[in-house]
Image (spheres, grey):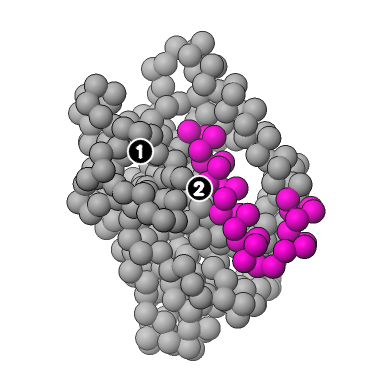
Amino acid sequence: MTDQGSTGTHSSAAQASSDGLTHAAPGRDLGREPAGHADAGIGAATAPGERHDPAIFPIRLLRFLPRALAVALMVLLGLVLVGTVYPLVRARGRDLLNRTWSRCLLRVCGVRLLVQGEPLMQGPVLIVANHVSWLDIFVINAVRPTAFVAKSEIRRWPIVGRLVAGAGTLFLQRGHRHAIHTVGEAMKGRFAQGESVGLFPEGTTTEGFSLLPFHGSLFEPARQAGVAIQPVALRFLRHGRRDAFAAFVGEETLVGNLWRVLGARGLAVETFYLSPLAAEAGGAGGQTRLEMAANARSRIQQALGD
């Protein structure tokens, strides 16, 4: 698979590696479009809350309709794979399918993926990231397939619930007394198999410019198992500028967000894989889970603010 980029990216700013992703050169304004294609003031962040698309309705509709059809076909393909192929192939084969499917989904949504840093591609790891959009899971899965912790209500969503359940999502029964313990044990089981587990410790989405407090309870399974914790910062761009346009926040419906995202152009996600937190079995270098959560949050906040 190739990356989700356009042909306008200068080779000095990013280069395509053998894994099919775009790895950006440090210190450059990622996602910058060639002169004449971007808005004035490129490189500066838009103010939080500004998510207006100036494109007139017919143009947005012409972008939206083919992408929406492609997304529907991708979801249908995902259901077929989960129901027929997944049970027949080993973990490596499922990972390949998951990664390829996620990259294709980003492509048909018109979202370009840019990767910085060194993602841990082998062995167990807990990925902790800021949460901006429903796209976040697929952005991370496009790099390394990851089993995410999600609220149990998603399992009951039409179509989507079956898809994410078949992909190995760990569901958290919020409000249940032993929910954290149950999910924690499931996380340890995945770690024992050398898998990557993903967590959005804010517990909800934001516009992506700042962070909410991190919940530390689900850092504990990784701490006890001595598994590395890798913070990941997700920065959304539009025409090369930091932008909240794709954020799925507040009372907005999924349909409304799809209309905006699939009808837009120039969307990209910078994915910063930060240095992992040191881990020692049973103690994680002597840090408590709250200290680990605070450390991960600080690193992500610093990356978001660069």
**Front residue of 151 and 96:** 96
Q: Nearer the viewer, mark 1 or mark 2?
A: 2
Q: Main secondary structure of the magenta part?
A: helix
Q: Position of residue 220 (x, y in %)?
A: 51, 77
Residue drawn 41% across and 22% down?
53
Residue 192 part of the magenta segment? no
Mark 2: which secondary structure?
loop
Location of mark 1 (residue)? 237
Q: Given the image, on which type of amino acid does mark 1 rest?
A: Leu
Find residue 262 and name its label.
none
The span picked out in magenta is: 81-110
Residue found at the very far right of the displayed protein: 84
Residue found at the very far front of the displayed protein: 18
Q: Residues within 10 Å of mark 2 (few under 14, many from 20)?
A: few
Q: Is residue 54 in view from this perspective?
A: yes
Residue 101 part of the magenta segment? yes
- In which quadrant of the rendered view does residue 192 lie? bottom right
Please indicate whether residue 274 sits to the left or right of residue 20 in the image: left
Q: Pick whichever of labels 1 and 2 is earlier in the sequence.
A: 2
**Front residue of 66 and 219:** 66
Mark 1: which secondary structure?
strand
Q: Is residue 175 in view from this perspective?
A: no
Location of mark 2 (residue)? 1
Q: Position of residue 152 (x, y in %)?
A: 69, 56
- In which quadrant of the rendered view does residue 185 lie? bottom right
